[in-house]
Image (cartoon, rainbow, N blue to C red):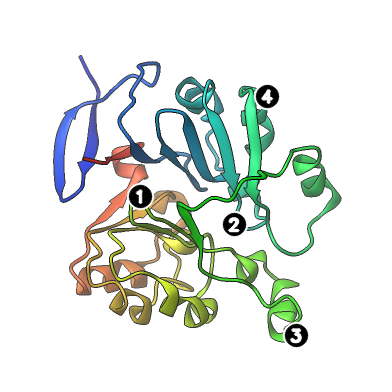
Amino acid sequence: MHRISLILLTGLLILCPSYKLGDRIEQKQFIVWNTGQGQWTTWVTENECLHFDVGGEFDLSKKVARLCGEKFNKIFLSHWDWDHIGLVGKFRVKTQHFCIAARPKGSASPHKERLLAGILSCLDSETRVASLFQQPMDDPRFLKKSEHSANHLSSVFWLKPASFLIPGDSTADEENFWKKEVPASTKGLVLGHHGSRSSTSLALLDKLPELQWAVSSARFSRYGHPHAEVVKRLAQKKIPLLRTEDWGTLHFYQR
């Protein structure tokens, strides 16, 4: 019997038998992988895979490689937390064409630095991805906060083809700086900081009048993410919340 999974089209939710990851699916799609407490999302086209963070509890590198192993892979890393970068090494050995389009800002431990050492940077400009928050690295406010948490230096990405906002673990403090740059046409939101109370403010949601769904890649049952206050804010705005914990890997297909 086929496992039932959630397939999402622009403006449409349907339940149908899931595809095997070994199948060749050439239709463009945005995938939120069920990595447990962590984040790994992928925009898939015929020849490329754009990955936004490569981390999580569950090692899905083999499954992702079945879909993207023969394509050209570009990696956008929001920040240095392990649940956003920890699976880069394992995925790296399973793919042939690999480069980093966006590296984490700020400093990291030698162990984390070695994880990315030797990986080439992508040389071509990427017009499909907008970087919405350019951290002021010389601003003492951000430098002081970043000493305690890499979240404050999270890069924020907007994927144009899918109209998805991917804010890493950016907190509400930083949202005040970049929320004005978010296109009002945004359709989907990958919850920042796994939906903890320190992000996804009402002020941000007010800037997204066309938002159709929010996605949480986390485990509420173990870690309490997404936070109840964020769930309440989404409900207040009548924005559906989709959890990989409940549905497994989510596929958003472009019509």
Q: Label 3, secondary structure: give it.
A: helix
Mark 4 or mark 3: name the one nearer the start of the chain. 4
Mark 1 or mark 2: name the one nearer the start of the chain. 2
Q: Is residue 64 above or below residue 195?
A: above
Q: Label 1, secondary structure: give it.
A: loop
Q: Which residue is mark 4?
A: 93
Q: Quadrant of the C terminus?
A: top left
Give the x, y percent position of residue 182.
40, 71
Q: Which residue is situated farthest in the right direction here?
A: 110
Identified by mark 2, the residue type is Ser
Whole-angstrom CA distance, mark 4 to mark 3, is 38 Å
Badge 3 vs badge 2, beta-carbon distance below 8 Å: no
Asked if residue 184 can be seen in this view, the reply is yes
Whole-angstrom CA distance, mark 1 to mark 2, is 19 Å
Q: Which residue is mark 1?
A: 161
Q: Which residue is mark 2?
A: 78
Category of crowding for the residue at label 1, using alpha-carbon neighbours closer than 10 angstroms: few (below 14), some (14–19), many (at least 20): few
Q: Which residue is mark 3?
A: 140
Mark 3 or mark 2: name the one nearer the start of the chain. 2
Mark 1 or mark 3: name the one nearer the start of the chain. 3
Task: Say left or right for 215 vs 181.
Answer: left
Tell me which residue sits at (61%, 24%) in the image: 95
